[in-house]
């Protein structure tokens, strides 16, 4: 087994590999993959020293959890497993105590385990925050006391909301996405100092900006404005001209930040796992990084509207219509 560097996940006592496995692709979120390919990606992650995986019943309408459960048969104790509840489809949300209880039981069955290491409320910006604070998080505390889940967290897009909810009801971890990568680094100013001060684990997701920073580009459901996708393709071409890939540069950039407990990357194949693991500890090419940052600069730190209007980030732009 490889020795990937690890960092504490807040005050949980868990040490997580600084690069971790996003299981969105296991649910065919980025295009169809066959089950065996996905399972091999999970096994490759373990062999390379990745010990943290994140999934959700939302990813592929439970497919991701089911495949992950298959992949972890006989290997459950080698992986710290995070899943979520509250979001079940594009527009299906239910963070009520009864649904969360049922959701945990369903996830335990699909994941073929009797405990979940980290249980997160998925995309909390879509519902009233007071319900999250007064009902959903206390329900997770009860489930923790019952031994079904070990730690609790929240996930979502608007940084201020994540911070305000975590200030009102302390959680073990916060999962933020698309706010610390080549297109957006606002996490460093807005949530990171808070998480550090409170000792909460910070999980950074979508360092490839949900596929924008790849040669193949993002899937059609991606909410960012068209200009961001066009610029993604432009910087991808520049990286190719330099004999490398934008994915490589984007991951190297994000992995450098020491205040992030772990960087979740969606990986669909064992080749992607091997490629990405090899980047850990290798700093980005500074000349190429500066050239890419100069191209991105006019579009830097743009965020899009997500969830209920009162939870939008200031200056967030409407989502691209598909
Ligand atoms: P990402 O930015 O990690 O991009 C994933 C895409 O990049 C996939 O298509 C993958 O196949 C591809 N890719 C990965 N490595 C590659 C390589 N070396 N070469 C070419 N392509 C490569 O986006 P993501 O998967 O959405 O984010 C990572 C994980 O974070 C998710 O799987 C999920 O677990 C988590 N996440 C959570 C939330 C939330 O809770 N609200 C939101 C976003 C992401």
Image: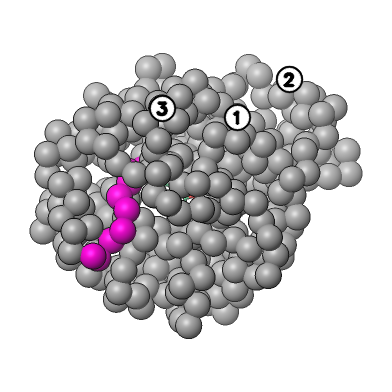
Helix or strand or loop: what does disc 1 sit on?
loop
Query: Which badge, 3 or 2, is on the more N-terminal residue?
Result: 3
Mark 1 to mark 2: distance in Å?
11 Å
User: Was residue 121 drawn as part of the magenta stretch in this picture?
Assistant: no
Residue to which mark 2 is pinned: 294
Q: Mark number for residue 183?
A: 1
Q: Main secondary structure of the magenta part?
A: strand
Q: Mark number for residue 197?
A: 3
Which residue is depicted at the point 60% across and 36% down? 258
Query: Which badge, 1 or 2, is on the more N-terminal residue?
Result: 1
The image quadrant where one finds the C terminus is top left
Choose between 154 and 183: the one closer to the eye. 154
Against 277, is 107 above or below?
below
Against 183, is 13 above or below?
below
Magenta residues (range): 147-155
Q: Are marks 1 and 3 in contact (CB under 8 Å)?
A: no
Which residue is depicted at the point 10% across and 58% down? 98
Helix or strand or loop: what does disc 3 sit on?
helix
Whether residue 212 is visible, yes or no, is no
Which residue is depicted at the point 78% across and 44% down? 282
Query: Which badge, 1 or 3, is on the more N-terminal residue?
Result: 1
Mark 3 to mark 2: distance in Å?
32 Å
């Amino acid at each position: 087994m490889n020795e990937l560097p690890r960092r504490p996940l807040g005050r949980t006592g868990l040490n997580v590999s600084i690069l971790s496995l996003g299981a969105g692709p296991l649910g065919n979120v980025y295009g169809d993959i066959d089950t065996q390919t996905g399972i091999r990606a999970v096994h490759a992650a373990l062999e390379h020293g990745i010990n943290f995986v994140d999934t959700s019943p939302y990813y592929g309408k439970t497919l991701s959890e089911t495949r992950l459960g298959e992949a972890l048969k006989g290997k459950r104790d080698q992986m710290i497993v995070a899943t979520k509840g509250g979001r079940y489809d594009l527009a299906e949300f239910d963070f009520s105590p009864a649904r969360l209880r049922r959701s945990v039981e369903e996830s335990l069955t699909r994941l073929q385990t009797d405990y979940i290491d980290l249980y997160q409320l998925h995309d909390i910006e879509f519902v009233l925050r007071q319900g999250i604070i007064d009902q959903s998080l206390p329900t997770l505390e009860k489930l923790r006391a019952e031994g079904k889940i070990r730690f609790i967290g929240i996930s979502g897009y608007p940084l201020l909301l994540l911070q305000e909810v975590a200030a009102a009801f302390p959680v073990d971890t916060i999962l933020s996405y698309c706010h610390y990568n080549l297109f957006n680094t606002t996490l460093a100013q807005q949530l990171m100092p808070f998480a550090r001060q409170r000792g909460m684990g910070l999980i950074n997701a979508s360092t490839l900006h949900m596929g924008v920073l790849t040669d193949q580009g993002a899937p059609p459901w991606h909410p960012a404005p068209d200009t961001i996708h066009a610029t993604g393709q432009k910087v991808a071409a520049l990286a190719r001209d330099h004999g490398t890939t934008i994915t490589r540069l984007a991951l190297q950039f994000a992995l450098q930040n020491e205040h992030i407990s772990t960087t979740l990357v969606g990986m669909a194949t064992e080749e992607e796992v091997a490629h990405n693991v090899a980047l850990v500890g290798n700093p980005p090419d500074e000349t190429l990084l500066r050239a890419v940052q100069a191209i991105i600069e006019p579009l830097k730190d743009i965020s899009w509207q997500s969830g209920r209007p009162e939870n939008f980030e200031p200056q967030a732009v409407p989502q691209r219509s598909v």
